[in-house]
């Protein structure tokens, strides 16, 4: 199959030539890499990749095709897609379409036949940079040969594009209207074991599905919801999902989370929800050099000593002491003590935290990982047990006899 020329350029001038893959044209975004060898469909449809150009480090992509069962949302969210060796055709009994065709259908500009190893090594050295993919009418004369004047023109376009740092993106990926997922499986049709208010900051569909399979009635709310909205269903707990953007820019979500904690509601956060809990408690967050993305990240559970292999997709992390439990900084320890429960073994990044005096915990990785691994799936049941215990301990409001 003959493909037209394409070029990938980073803001620091690093450039690679290749062939157009998916839609032709121009796309801009932060260029990041994923180390996963499987699960590309789940990655493409993960809202956390909004405004990012995703580089696959596994060389051969597309051989299992695409289907209508595995997506984590109703669209492809990546800003662009970079692969080395695209499959010529899908070859899997579950495939319903080719990856290339789906990228075209969703208007995702991509590039193939590039040295993704060299690109990944460059990002590891220079950090996650803004970049662009150019093909078709968006490719200036001479760019296909990396002529300096053409690359400089493309680099100028990239340098004028928005940065990820400081970007508040939750509203761009969140549901616009609330919806409910009823308990499933053995709990279908019966009374829910718990009622949950879930704030959609870019939630993956697998998350409420797992909770529903445990007997939880999940009410999913838009990112701009208020505490009054969440409390309208009399929830047993509140969940904040994964999502894109800089947590320091998410002032509404941080204030809402503090109101949730003030109300004494059990809280569980995943990924972006972990970063927001850190900020709500008074800790800072910072941008990682190149982030964690993939399905093979080792994380230590410090409470048990167990190492779990986990799925990640984050470019920011919580800046929290790794030592003993300490009083949280916000309002002179308003929320009591907190501790780091999980750390990434590759770089000692905070991967989970827990409050010791209020019912709240979170993890930075993705325990709902649809493509696997499932080492951390027990966390959903842990949260359910927290909600059930808290409900039993709540005062009834009745006077003593």
Image (cartoon, rainbow, N blue to C red):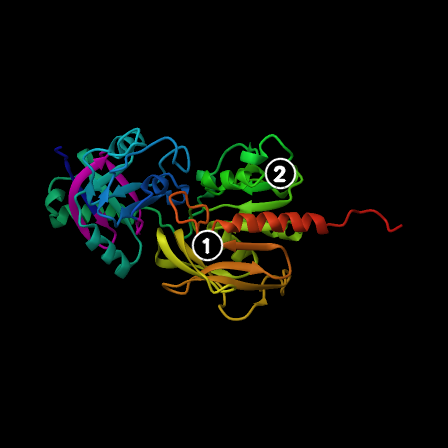
Q: In the rendered structure, which disc, 2 or 1, sits on the residue that comes first in sequence? A: 2
* Residue 187 drawn in magenta: no
Pick the residue in front: 279 or 357. 357
Binning the other alpha carbons within 10 Å of mark 2 as few (below 14), some (14 to 19) or many (20 upward) gives: some
* 2 or 1: mark nearer the eye: 1
What span is in magenta? 9-36
Residue 11 picture location, percent across and down: 25, 52
Residue 27 picture location, percent across and down: 27, 40
Pick the residue in front: 245 or 217. 217
Q: Secondary structure at mark 1?
A: loop
Residue 117 picture location, percent across and down: 21, 53
Residue 262 picture location, percent across and down: 66, 53
Q: 326 above or below 5?
A: below
Binning the other alpha carbons within 10 Å of mark 1 as few (below 14), some (14 to 19) or many (20 upward) gives: many
In which quadrant of the rendered view does residue 50 lie?
A: top left
- Side (left or right) of 107 relative to 230: left
Q: Secondary structure at mark 2?
A: helix
Residue lying farthest to the right in this orientation: 401
| Residue at 24%, 38% in the rendered image | 63
* Residue 16 drawn in magenta: yes
Q: Which residue is mark 2?
A: 229
Q: How many marks?
A: 2
Q: Which residue is mark 1?
A: 364
Quadrant (top left/top right/bottom left/bottom right) for the N terminus: top left
In which quadrant of the rendered view does residue 218 lie?
A: top right
Separation of marks 2 and 1 at Cα, in angstroms: 26 Å
- Side (left or right) of 238 relative to 26: right
Residue lying farthest to the front in this orientation: 186
- The secondary structure that dominates the magenta segment is strand
């Amino acid at each position: 199959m003959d493909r037209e020329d394409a070029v990938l350029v980073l803001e620091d001038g690093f450039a690679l030539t290749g062939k157009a893959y998916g839609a032709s044209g121009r796309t801009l975004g932060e260029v990041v890499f994923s180390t996963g060898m499987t699960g590309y469909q789940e990655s493409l449809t993960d809202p956390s990749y909004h405004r990012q150009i995703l580089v696959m480090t596994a060389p051969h992509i597309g051989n299992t095709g695409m289907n209508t069962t595995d997506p984590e949302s109703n669209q492809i969210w990546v800003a662009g897609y970079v692969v080395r060796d695209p499959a010529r055709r899908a070859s899997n009994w579950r495939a319903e379409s080719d990856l290339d065709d789906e990228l075209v259908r969703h208007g995702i500009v991509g590039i193939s036949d590039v040295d993704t190893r060299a690109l990944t090594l460059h990002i590891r050295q220079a950090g996650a940079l803004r970049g662009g993919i150019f093909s078709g009418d968006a490719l200036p004369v001479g760019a296909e040969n990396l002529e300096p004047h053409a690359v400089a023109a493309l680099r100028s376009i990239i340098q004028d594009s928005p940065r990820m740092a400081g970007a508040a993106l939750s509203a761009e990926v969140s549901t616009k209207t609330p919806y409910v997922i009823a308990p499933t499986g053995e709990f279908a049709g019966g009374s829910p074991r718990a009622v949950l208010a879930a704030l959609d900051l870019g939630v993956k569909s697998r998350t409420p599905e797992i909770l529903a399979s445990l007997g939880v009635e999940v009410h999913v709310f838009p990112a701009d919801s208020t505490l009054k909205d969440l409390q309208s269903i009399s929830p047993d707990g509140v969940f904040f999902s994964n999502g894109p953007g800089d947590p320091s820019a998410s002032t509404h979500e941080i204030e809402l989370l503090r109101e949730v904690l003030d109300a004494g509601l059990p809280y569980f956060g995943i990924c972006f929800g972990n970063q927001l809990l850190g900020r709500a408690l008074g800790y800072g967050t910072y941008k990682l050099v190149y982030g964690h993305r993939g399905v093979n990240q080792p994380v230590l559970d410090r409470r048990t000593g167990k190492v779990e292999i986990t799925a990640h997709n984050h470019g920011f992390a919580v800046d929290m002491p790794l030592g003993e439990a300490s009083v949280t900084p916000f309002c002179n320890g308003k929320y009591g003590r907190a501790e780091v429960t999980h750390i990434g073994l590759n770089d000692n990044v905070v991967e989970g935290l827990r409050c010791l005096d209020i019912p709240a915990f979170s993890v930075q990785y993705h325990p709902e990982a649809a493509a696997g691994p499932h080492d951390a799936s027990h966390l959903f049941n842990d949260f359910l047990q927290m909600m059930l215990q808290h409900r039993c301990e709540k005062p009834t409001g009745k006077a003593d006899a």
